[in-house]
Image (spheres, coloured by chain):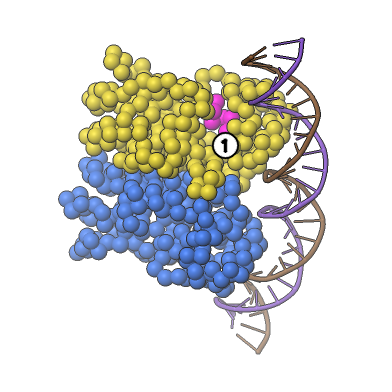
Chain colours: A yellow, B blue, C brown, D purple
Amino acid sequence: MHGTKHPSLRNRLLALVPANEFQNIAEVLHPVDLPKGTVITRANEKIDCVYFLCSGIGSVVTTAKDGQRAEAGMVGREGFCPTSAGVGGTISIHEVLMQVPGQAYTMQLGAMTDILPTNPVFSNLLARYIQSFAAQISFTALCNANYQVDQRLARWLLMCHDRLDGDEIMITHDFVSLMLAVRRPSVTNAFHILEGLKLVFAERGRVTIRDRKGLEDFAGAAYGDPEEEYRRLIGEI
Amino acid sequence: MHGTKHPSLRNRLLALVPANEFQNIAEVLHPVDLPKGTVITRANEKIDCVYFLCSGIGSVVTTAKDGQRAEAGMVGREGFCPTSAGVGGTISIHEVLMQVPGQAYTMQLGAMTDILPTNPVFSNLLARYIQSFAAQISFTALCNANYQVDQRLARWLLMCHDRLDGDEIMITHDFVSLMLAVRRPSVTNAFHILEGLKLVFAERGRVTIRDRKGLEDFAGAAYGDPEEEYRRLIGEI
DNA sequence: GATTTTATGTACGCTGGCATACACTCCGCT
DNA sequence: AGCGGAGTGTATGCCAGCGTACATAAAATC
């Protein structure tokens, strides 16, 4: 962090910390590269590091004791993970893996524990993010219960798009099927529907968003509310 | 709150606030009775009051713009609602309705906003609860995606049981079907399965838990992890 | 006691997504 | 160039849960 200018931080949360508190935080932040597939948080293990992504996307996956897995939500430069560290917790129920590679600033859990009680604005910012993330998970739960695969896929693609700079997402049907907790052929089928409507363009290992607005219309009520909650509590993504 | 002894408060969060902070909070708390069906928080409207339940259960329901509804989780004397008020928010994405009637202490949103910045232990306690509630929602999402109706019903009944004193729950199949986002006959069917295993006893408008341990076994990995997270972050329920 | 309302039991046809399997195609590697 | 693995397209049989409808039964109301 030495020499990094505060406003240039691409992580939205860090960028919003006032200067007096940011001094304390900057001292313990370290930049890291996170290649695709890196597991930055393991479920049900002692938390090692806390991550503030500057680019890339992490998938936040709930893992049950019997091995069942499903994505709860995703985190990019608008948030941090694991969230439990933001309130003084030491264990995460979620696994977080880098679905799209990127950079992050990281701090040791111990540093976070020291910083939280003495930096109230920072603490409140993290708590606000946790609340907005809870909204995101709520909609994941709603969508899992009430919407079909194609609509859920549209929502998922939009959430990726929000956290990326371009229109290209490098992912396989197989990975998406894990995230949506459906069969891989169901994802293939759903992509065909979105392609037929000219909303996306799918190649081997790559998806290009062609019509963002159309995708939003297709996703309908499945997309949007959690994003509003984030804007209310924190600001523009 | 005049004359109420602090340790006698049945709400778990209020009971854990240290005396020096509790003084400030007690001044603005008011007891209320909450009959069955009371909607204590409306979705997407300005928050009026914050509730700390002492008894009863509130269902926290996500409502999409197209009217789709599904339960995100439930709150009893172990928590508070609406959660967004706990970090300074003024609007809730969730509706909360009293599924089992009870009592609560309540404060105006304005009082909450005043109290949060000056009472750090209280603020952190609320943030911890939000994190544990996020864990609860995460498992709702996982269960909606991966488990069958009977197992989800078992989880739901266990969560009710945790928040009640006896073994009786006054609910209709119709209400449960709304909460689980399934058809009402699917609930009837799932109850028959649980009754066949002698785990519960179902009458018109009433369910009695006969075998708590057996229900937990039946629910399997669908139940337990969020409850652990609560214990880690806050303490016994 | 009779009537209405509410809650539960049950049936029927339908379909989305499941589990599984296999073929094809693109890409990297030797 | 040829091989092998990874990613995608597609098929088949199956079933859980859907939408809907209707019958019964228990409570509430008159």
> Looking at the image, which residue is at 36% across and 31% down?
A50
- Is residue A201 rendered to the left or right of residue A104? right
Residue A4 % position (x, y): 31, 15
Residue D11 % position (x, y): 82, 38
Q: Which residues are magenta?
A: A155-161
Residue B115 % position (x, y): 25, 45
Split into 4 quadrants, where in the image is the N terminus of chain B? Answer: bottom left
> Looking at the image, which residue is at 47% across and 52% down?
B73
> Looking at the image, which residue is at 37% across and 51% down?
B230
Residue A68 % position (x, y): 55, 45
Looking at the rendered structure, the secondary structure element under dot 1 is helix
Query: Residue B88, can we see it?
Result: no
- Main SS of residues in magenta: helix
Q: Is residue A231 above or below residue B130?
A: above
Residue type, mark 1 in image: Met
- Is residue B237 rendered to the left or right of residue C26? left
Q: Is residue A207 above or below residue A176?
A: above
Query: Residue A33, can we see it?
Result: yes
Task: Give the residue pinned by disc 1.
Answer: A179
Q: Is residue B73 above or below residue B193?
A: above
- Is residue A138 rendered to the left or right of residue A16? right
